[in-house]
Image: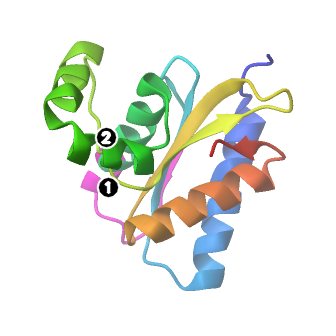
């Protein structure tokens, strides 16, 4: 496994923002984390509210620290709310269990980080995240 580079993290952001522009999405905030949950790069578009940074971070943090993409975390939260509450308390960080947080895989399928996006609908946030990962030459986890 090779660590997520700054160039890759910035390419993810640029790819996500290009997707957002092409689709006419609202202003986004994009946060890219490494495999340890540390911020590798982030961007907040003009007109994106400041709170979107925290939401984007929490989507990515939940995905990389718990395992599945944040869309699956939403299902877990609905199906097993007590378990999810316990996990969130145990990992010691914020989690927003809705679509928009996607785990990043390298060419060997190893988890190297996660990207979280907030600013539009959760489905659009997720689509932009996936587009950014692909634009960087990496793969999104299913």
Residue lying furthest front in this view? 79
Q: Position of residue 42 (x, y in %)?
A: 52, 44
Q: Position of residue 122 (x, y in %)?
A: 39, 65
Other-residue count near label 2 (Cα within 10 Å), few / some / many at <14 / 14–19 / ≥20: some
Q: Which residues are magenta?
A: 42-54
Residue 65, quarter of picture: top left
* Residue at (71% x, 32% y) in the render: 6
Other-residue count near label 1 (Cα within 10 Å), few / some / many at <14 / 14–19 / ≥20: many
Q: Secondary structure at mark 1?
A: helix
* Residue at (39% x, 48% y) in the render: 56
The residue pinned by badge 2 equals 76
- In terms of depth relative to the viewer, which is nearer, 97 or 30? 97
Q: Position of residue 44 (x, y in %)?
A: 45, 57
Q: Secondary structure at mark 2?
A: helix
* Residue at (74% x, 28% y) in the render: 5
- In terms of depth relative to the viewer, which is nearer, 18 or 59? 59
- In terms of depth relative to the viewer, which is nearer, 44 or 59? 59
The residue pinned by badge 1 equals 52
* Residue at (23% x, 25% y) in the render: 88
- Would residue 77 be counted in the magenta stretch? no
Quarter of the picture containing the N terminus is top right
């Amino acid at each position: 496994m090779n660590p997520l580079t700054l160039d890759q993290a910035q390419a993810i952001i640029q790819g996500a923002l290009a997707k957002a522009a092409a689709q006419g999405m609202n202003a986004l905030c994009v946060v890219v984390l490494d495999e340890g949950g540390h911020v590798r790069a982030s961007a907040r578009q003009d007109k994106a509210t400041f709170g979107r940074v925290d939401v984007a971070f929490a989507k990515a943090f939940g995905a990389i620290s718990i395992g599945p993409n944040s869309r699956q975390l939403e299902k877990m939260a609905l199906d097993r709310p007590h378990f999810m509450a316990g996990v969130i308390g145990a990992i010691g960080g914020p989690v927003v269990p809705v679509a928009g947080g996607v785990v990043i895989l390298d060419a060997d399928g190893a988890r190297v980080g996660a990207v979280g996006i907030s600013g539009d609908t959760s489905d659009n946030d997720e689509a932009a995240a996936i587009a950014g990962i692909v634009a960087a030459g990496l793969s999104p986890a299913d």
